Amino acid sequence: MESVDGPGPAAGRLGSTMSDSMQENSQFTVLIVDDDDEIRYSLGRVLGSQGYRIDTASSGEEGIETVKRGPPPDLIFMDIRMGGITGLETLQHMRSIDSSLQIILMTAFGTAQTAIEAMKFGAYDYVMKPFDPEKVLNLASNAIDATRDLRAASKSAKKVNSEDYKEGIVGNSAAMQEVFKIIGQVAASDATVLVTGESGTGKELIANCIYQHSLRSGGPFMAVNCAAIPENLIESELFGHEKGSFTGATSQRIGKFEQCDRGTIFLDEIGDMALATQTKILRVLQDGEIQRVGGSETIKVDVRVIAATNKDLETMVREREFREDLYYRLNVFRIRVPALIERTEDIPDIVDFMLQKLVKDRKAKATRLSDDAMATLLRYPWPGNVRELGNVVYHSAVVAQGDMILVKDLPGTLLSDDVNGSEAPTVEGDMSTNAPATSQPVAPASYDYGMPTEMPVSPEASLRESFDFIYETVKEREGKRILSYIERRMIQRAVADTGGNQARAAEILGITRNTLKKRLDEYAADSSED
């Protein structure tokens, strides 16, 4: 093995004139593994010129022995095609010794198979020969930062015990503690409960938690998404039907209310229910009776009802879009699930819980986040709430090349300068940062994060909810700062929705781009409300 201590022969003579960045780089060792003497020499000169200490190995076997002997190098550049074992085989051996190693592969044959295999086995990135010195130095700097993140991260941080959150609700914030208190108060009763909150906050989890802690936990629990079932079928779904009651009714059907006798039914998105069906729901709540569609027999049922909506039912009642008497029947106890932006202190525990679940289900290997990656999550406004966070965690855990999620593994919507108020890499397919080519994390539809599936709220309903609910809530919480509070949230939401496109966000908000930039700078300087 050859070794060059310091920034190379030429740079080594600079002595005290070495720049601050070169002095900092001199703390880090880069191992170059290649069977080509010229590549080892030329790459060593490029990296050594910036202060890195250089070690070299002429084969994969020699590189593995170097890693075993230690201390571990801070970064490895390695050829894919060498005599003896290949670079890909060497990579797997090295990472089995130390999973935190950052390895950049070099190849003269850039094929799709090469790229896929390199990333699958945990390479930080790969470069083409002949290499571009500037790109090599940028890659080295980014990879060293990743190494620093991995080594600086605390391995003794307390982990969320998934057994403590078997219902899937994670949170120790004051806002969630209030929710838990109300659940404890209402669970043991048969009182009807109305759960409200934005889409993606986990209203079905709250309903299920009430059921699990109720005296009816031994009975059935059924969830019905009222927005997902066509109006002409919702009554059959809820109350059942008799044979021949309508075209296609070839046999008798038992509805959800009968199936839930002595149990609990969860009516999700009840604000989307037709007025005619609302009348029949009211009868169940008042008298405990139903009739199947096409039937004349009155059937007694003993069912507890928990309903949920992301709409403003009070406004709907005033506009005669929702029955007033049903509203009061439902609103015996009300639980408002806070938006994620209102309980950002819960994000670390939620992320930890999600990662544990992914690892347990063998969906990913990453078990933790770097400090910078977590800081990025804490700055983001989360318009999609916990469901969006779940998608981001899944995306990042799959992309991560080890057991830690780094900033570079996060999707592009979180890395925008405009969203976070700080410099961050883009994701437009830039292989030099190993950024994902898409800015939208997409989780498989079959994977269950513990979040309910909810229909998106309509723009009209969002406006109604904003004018009434936000005004009252913000007035109580912020006093005379209602306008500044709402302006800040709206600007953050517009920037997030446009993926950080300032021009588009300004157009949506009806302000100039300069005004938008000024506001974002102010928010970045003052993070007290974030």
Image (cartoon, rainbow, N blue to C red):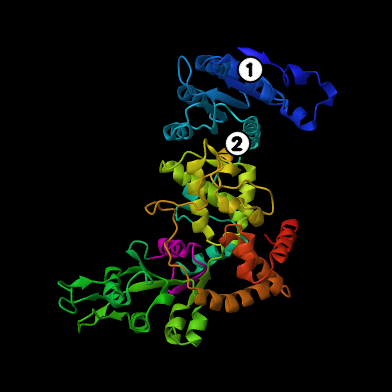
The percent position of residue 288, horizontal first and vertical second, equals: 32, 80
Q: Quadrant of residue 524?
A: bottom right
The percent position of residue 194, horizontal first and vertical second, equals: 47, 73
User: Is 357 drawn above or below residue 97 in the view shown?
Assistant: below
Residue at coordinates 72% horizontally, 66% vertically from top-left? Answer: 515
Give the label, 1 or 2, closer to the camera.
1
Residue at image mark 1: 41
Towards the viewer: 188 or 334: 334
Q: Is residue 483 left or right of residue 200?
A: right
At label 2, counting other C-alpha atoms closer than 10 Å, the crowd grade (few under 14, some 14-19, many 20 or more) is: few
Q: Amino acid at mark 2?
A: Lys
- The reply to whether the magenta stretch includes residue 243 is no
Outermost residue toward the top in this view: 1
Q: Total number of numbered labels?
A: 2
Which quadrant would the C terminus be assigned to in this image?
Answer: bottom right
User: Is 334 drawn above or below residue 321 in the view shown?
Assistant: above
Q: Amino acid at mark 1?
A: Tyr
Q: Quadrant of residue 327?
A: bottom left
Q: Is residue 134 left or right of residue 403?
A: right
Q: Secondary structure at mark 2?
A: loop
Q: Is residue 340 visible?
A: no
Q: Which residues are magenta?
A: 188-215
Residue 155, labelled with which disc? Answer: 2
Earlier along the polypeptide chain: callout 1 or callout 2?
1
Residue at coordinates 55% horizontally, 43% vertically from top-left? Answer: 435
Towards the viewer: 54 or 109: 109
User: Is 9 drawn above or below residue 191 in the view shown?
Assistant: above
Towards the viewer: 275 or 142: 142
Q: Secondary structure at mark 1?
A: helix
Residue 161, labelled with which disc? Answer: none
